[in-house]
Image (spheres, rainbow, N blue to C red):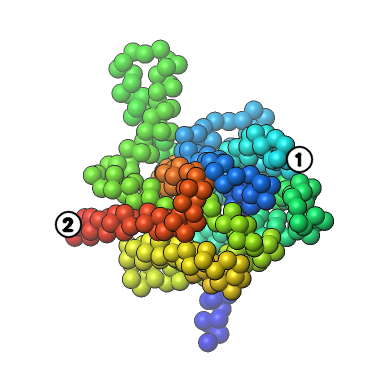
Amino acid sequence: MTSDALSSWLQALRVYTHPRVLGMLSLGFSAGLPLLLIMGTLSFWLREAGIDRTTIGHLSWIGLAYSFKWLWSPLVDRLSLPLLTRWLGRRRAWLLLSQITIAMALTGMAFTDPVINLTHLVFFALAVAFASATQDIALDAYRIEAVAAELQGAMAATYQAGYRVAMILASAGVLWIAAAVDVTADAYDHAPWRFAYLVMAFSMIVGIISTLVIREPDVPYNRLISENEKIAQQAIAAWHLHPRIGNLLVWLYGALIAPFRDFIMRHGRQALLILGLIAIYRISDVVMGVMSNPFYVDMGYSKEEVATISKVYGVIMTIVGAAIGGVLTVKIGIMRTLFLGAVLSAATNLMFVWLAGRGHDVSGLIFTISADNLSAGIASCAFIAYLSGLTNSAYSATQYALFSSVMLLLPKFIAGFSGQFVDAYGYESFFIATAILGLPVLVLVWLAGQAKFTHSSQ
């Protein structure tokens, strides 16, 4: 490599020294921490506490808060918080409020034993879910507005790195901490889980400090929305409504209707096909994932084994899969990679059928988890690339909130019945059923690919 080429690479790498790019590392950590604490890790805790699988399956509906965040995303985007907005700015105010709420709710979860008061634990978990979804809305908006377009790739990279580190801490880290302080390994004890979740609550300080340190983006207030509001105001003025009602309708149009109208106008009749694909693309993984931790517990795997294999090693394989997916999207295109990811996601669920027949088999668990997470990484990478191509930069935050909400709504609802299915038919039948759920995805990917090809050729 010549000195000029080396200098060029070093110059490119300096993008990661930008203060706001570095800040996304800790903000990504703050965003990634709560998710598993109210889903996968919580299901492990509940199963160890003796909570039945049907209840655990129903409690996975807590994650539906992420599916409905588009409902209040305009409020986060437009509503000022008393005192906080004046002090910190619109984005940082909502970030700080949501982060403090997450820390307080996690503390409430820590001090609640599900054996004694499961209802209180559920309420605290719901608070974590809604605050975390709100943090995602504010953080997506901050990330888009904070830097120029050429820095968005670096922002996304550091965000994902922080997010993945947090996922390891919130899954494997919690299991390791709980196991380290557990003096009653043969029986359930609330104390280790209380300590582990208190550590997680304190870990939110990383995001809180970052929010206080970063600067509010210097972006004009919703320029495109303001233009749309002027158009709506002219039309609504002819109705001769009360000024307050008229202003409310104008606000609703600019914040809610305009972004969705833009999506429909750009994609026409294909919009329903696209939304259908988004709604079910991850259905095999999401439905299967709710029962994965209870399955590990029932198969006799210890906290340490699950932490090491399923969490740390699994996350690493997900990152490897994402890297492969990135190469494939360039080499064979997004739609073909999307199809491949759907095939692999459904097929690797069948490997859990094989694992269920082997009992406690660490080698089998390593092999199964490796394949499952590798395929998930490929599918996720292709899916994110697909969603990015659908988003209009003028409405990126609102439209992305819609896409990510639609993505989880149906899978999370169906996943709520997963415990009942396992109780009635067993793990083997459940894993086969989740693989079958992936078959309609292949049809929709093919149809979406054909529609895209037809549209581009016209």
**Numbered-mark total:** 2
Residue occupying the point 43% across, 21% down: 247
**Which residue is denoted by mark 1 in the rendering?**
111
Q: Amino acid at mark 1?
A: Phe
Residue occupying the point 69% across, 47% down: 49
Q: Earlier in the sequence, mark 1 or mark 2?
A: 1
Q: Is 368 rendered above or below residue 396?
A: below
Query: Residues at badges 1 and 2 in contact (C-beta under 8 Å)?
Result: no
Rendered location of residue 265, percent (x, y): 27, 42
Q: Secondary structure at mark 1?
A: loop
Rendered location of residue 449, percent (x, y): 27, 59
| Label number found at residue 458 | 2
- Residue closer to the observer: 426 or 444: 426
Residue occupying the point 54% across, 62% down: 157
Q: Amino acid at mark 2?
A: Gln
Residue sitting farthest toward the bottom:
1
- Residue closer to the observer: 204 or 421: 421
Residue occupying the point 23% across, 58% down: 450
Image quadrant occupied by the C terminus? bottom left
- Residue closer to the observer: 142 or 150: 142
Residue sitting farthest toward the left:
458
Q: Secondary structure at mark 2?
A: loop
Q: Is 242 rendered above or below residue 388?
A: above
